[in-house]
Amino acid sequence: EAGVTQFPSHSVIEKGQTVTLRCDPISGHDNLYWYRRVMGKEIKFLLHFVKESKQDESGMPNNRFLAERTGGTYSTLKVQPAELEDSGVYFCASSPVGKNIQYFGAGTRLSVL
Amino acid sequence: QKEVEQNSGPLSVPEGAIASLNCTYSDRGSQSFFWYRQYSGKSPELIMFIYSNGDKEDGRFTAQLNKASQYVSLLIRDSQPSDSATYLCAVNGVSGGYNKLIFGAGTRLAVHP
């Protein structure tokens, strides 16, 4: 069974540009989470989808970040326009309904120059 | 005060020894506790979870939980060089929802031959 996959693994963009990160959860997992780790800090929660609905987006830093999960399968996280402080590793995780054990992808390393 | 605190390390132990990793948390209402292992550039990999006070053993790993003292620990017996990684402690958040994980910054473990 495939794990959580994220694309791209690394993205380098200039300040002001737009970047879209993608996450494919484990098949059948209704819960999908986005987290972020900025340099030297702990991994922090961004938001949680249950199927296509946003259950909790309390960790989204500002309105430059837009997450979607159309059809309840894969999710995208768009940053527009990107700022220097957005640099970090963006992780996606998924879990099946009724279970709070989260399985993580390898992350997308975003570098904003 | 951070919500989840870990000693950043590195914790250096000789091969074959017991490695002891500790974590404290601030939210007394937290109910689920997780240990993830992360190799550099890879996804956080769940190795243990514990919900009840006491010990939980799985192979060479033992998780210990003391809710009264608000700490959770991970013991690795017969440490191997392949155990060298960053170990992340995570707690299910009570405030704002039971689904999001709150992470510590991680402890780097180095097992030397």
Image (cartoon, grey):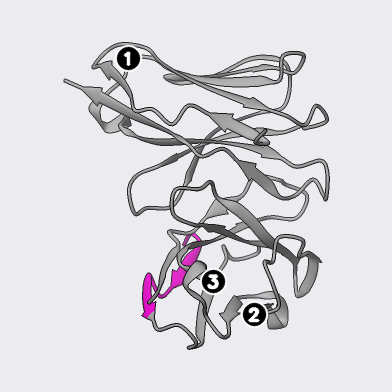
Tags 3 and 1 touching, CB below 8 Å: no
Parent chain of label 2: A
Q: Which residues are magenta?
A: A1-12
* Residue A82 painted magenta: no
Amino acid, disc 2? Arg
Q: Earlier in the sequence, mark 2 or mark 3?
A: 3
Tags 2 and 3 touching, CB below 8 Å: no
What residue is shown with label 3? A23
Could you say which is closer to the camera, residue A25 or residue B92? B92
Image quadrant where one finds the N terminus of chain B: top right
**Which element type, helix, strand or loop, lies under badge 1?**
loop
Q: Residues within 10 Å of mark 3 (few under 14, many from 20)?
A: many
Image quadrant where one finds the C terminus of chain B: top left
What residue is shown with label 1? B78
**Which element type, helix, strand or loop, lies under badge 3?**
strand
Amino acid, disc 1? Asp
Parent chain of label 3: A
Name, please, the residue furthest toward the bottom: A17
* Left or right: B1, with B40 as reference point: right
